[in-house]
Image (spheres, grey):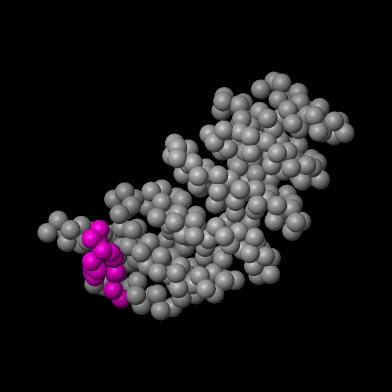
Amino acid sequence: KLAISILSDCLLECPEQEETLLTLLINKLGDPNAEVSKHTIMNLIRILKKHNNMTQVVTGEIQQQIERVKTQSLHNYILLLNKIVFFEDDLDYISNVVKIYFSQFKRLNRERDETHKNEILTLILKGINNIVNNLDPSTLETTFNTISEEINSLFRLTYSNSFKVQIEAMKLIFHFIKVEENLRDRYYRTLYRFIGTLTNVSAMKLDATFSAALLLINELLKTRKEMRALVFSKRHFLDSDDEEHFVDVDDGEPKSKQIKRAAKEKRKAQEA
């Protein structure tokens, strides 16, 4: 950690030596010691806050190294990328970062080892969501065209065994349906199924991830009014055998109670 601090201080004071010093610093993101990699991220962010014109150089070094690191080390590289992307407003830079994210997205989809896969996929999808959330429609459309060949992979992630991955995938596709009309029907069919799966989330514990899912659905209901009637007049779920199961909901109940009650009645029906 001391060596990292010294390297960082040298880079702050002598940016003309950035090529050598950056290579050494970013290489430490792959250090197996979590404290070392965490300290490296902290120092790189400190450098970028003082020299934000180095953002593209840092990103370029990440791009070069990230292809060579082991899958379990990707976490720190993506985490740093998620933290620095907002220091740069250049659209070419943003497009390049999206390409980096999706190159690793494709890499993970080829991986058979599931040990770190969902955790890193969640980080990648969060990073892309953070970018596209602030894009104007024209830039969003350009971004979609860049990664459109991966849209089927994104839809497959809505069936992931990780709820966090499902949430981030649903959020990202929602951004893209704003500029690609052909995705709308497929997305809303997926959403109907997704709403049903919410009843099975760990005894309905309202943690941050679950709350994010409810917020996502709330935003969708604002733009798709016919869904409101479906979701709140009849609670529609698919059982494991794909038979439809309907539970009446009292419109006077708070939504949180409606969801819990619907889940309880579904469990009773399955036990019967």
Front-most of residues 11 and 70: 70
Front-most of residues 20 and 212: 20
Residue drawn 70% across and 55% down? 94
- Is residue 83 among what the camera can see? no
Q: Is residue 243 magenta?
A: yes
Q: Is residue 232 above or below residue 48?
A: below
How many numbered dots are placed on residues in this image? 0
Picture quarter with the N terminus: top right
Front-most of residues 228 and 131: 131
Picture quarter with the C terminus: bottom left
Residue 238 coordinates in the image, percent (x, y) = 28, 64
Extreme-left residue of the structure: 272
Task: Tell me if 152 is positioned left or right of 201 in this view.
Answer: right
- Is residue 180 among what the camera can see? yes
Residue drawn 68% across and 36% down? 65
Give the magenta range.
Answer: 233-247
Q: Is residue 14 above or below residue 218?
A: above
Residue drawn 48% across and 38% down? 116
Task: Tell me if 124 is positioned left or right of 140 in this view.
Answer: left
Residue 26 coordinates in the image, percent (x, y) = 69, 33
Q: Is residue 252 magenta?
A: no
Q: Is residue 140 above or below residue 77?
A: below
Dominant secondary structure, magenta: strand
Residue 185 coordinates in the image, percent (x, y) = 45, 73
Task: Tell me if 24 is positioned left or right of 206 in this view.
Answer: right
- State which quadrant residue 218 falls in: bottom left
Residue 111 coordinates in the image, percent (x, y) = 49, 41
Residue drawn 32% across and 62% down? 196
